[in-house]
Amino acid sequence: MGQPVASRGRAATPTLGKAMLNKYARAFFTRVLTPFASFLIRRGVSPDTVTLLGTAGVVAGALVFYPMGEFFWGTVVITLFVFSDLVDGNMARQLGRSSRWGAFLDSTLDRVADGAIFGGFALWYAGGGDDIALCAVSIFCLASGQVVSYTKARGESIGLPVAVNGLVERAERLVIALTLAGLAGLHKFGVPGIQYLLPIALWIVAVGSLITLIQRVVTVRRESAEAEQAAEAAEAVQAADEPSATGPAAGESREQGSEAAK
């Protein structure tokens, strides 16, 4: 996946940090974080280490705070570690590295972070939140998010472009879930009625993920059919270009056989 080093080869799939910051904010934070990235490089810290620590922080924030119903503080912790997405890319750019391994690691750990976030919601509703329906919705969000990502990766692995973005991709899923979860957490600070924002977020993500999954499956089916039709047409053209058994070559052979018989 030879993309620009700044994204460590992952321009096609937005990281959580890139999803939560617009291009102007990213430019600002890139300038702010560059000295810190340089400091880490001088200390011998690798971009992969930053990626791993960032994911560990997201997982801890989600699985420690969310099951206790501490949605505000959990989101604050997760957001702090989100900046590792910008730091590791900055470090990779300074080191001049464009690593397939870095791209693979980022993409794999993204799935881990996603699972932890929605798993934390599910644990809350299975326990103190005491809502089996929302627990099930949280689990669906977790599973559908993984499958949505898999459909694109699998389609591309068999040579299809999978030329569709979908209604709710990873960036949208996480921005919706984390923003409304953080706001819902303000209920513990005395803000009335705001706790309902999290259930709303989960339903939006669940429905949006289902629609996105259908969009991608339909796209892969269409592209697969088009690829097979193109292959069949190419085979037909190739077969038409080959000399037939009754063509000039065959006639020449019969003429040569007749001369030999004489």
Image (tube, grey):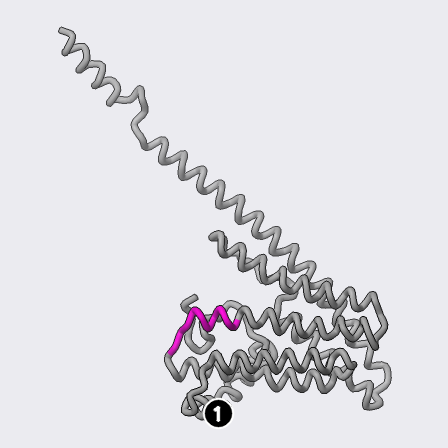
Instruction: Give the residue number, with chain letter if any, for mark 1.
Output: 36
Task: Tell me if residue 118 comes above or below residue 50 in the rendering.
Answer: above
- Return the x and y of residue 44 as percentages of the image width and height: 42, 88
Which kind of residue does numbered mark 1 sit on?
Phe
- Return the x and y of residue 205 as percentages of the image width and height: 71, 67
Left or right: 2, with 186 as reference point = left
Binning the other alpha carbons within 10 Å of mark 1 as few (below 14), some (14 to 19) or many (20 upward) gives: some
Left or right: 71, with 218 as reference point = right
The residue at 47%/75% (across/down) is 7
Give the total of numbered labels. 1
- Residue at disc 1, secondary structure: helix
The stretch drawn in magenta includes residue 139 = no
Res. 167 image quadrant: bottom right
Q: Which region of the structure is painted magenta? A: 97-106
- Return the x and y of residue 200 as percentages of the image width and height: 78, 71
The residue at 56%/59% (across/down) is 152
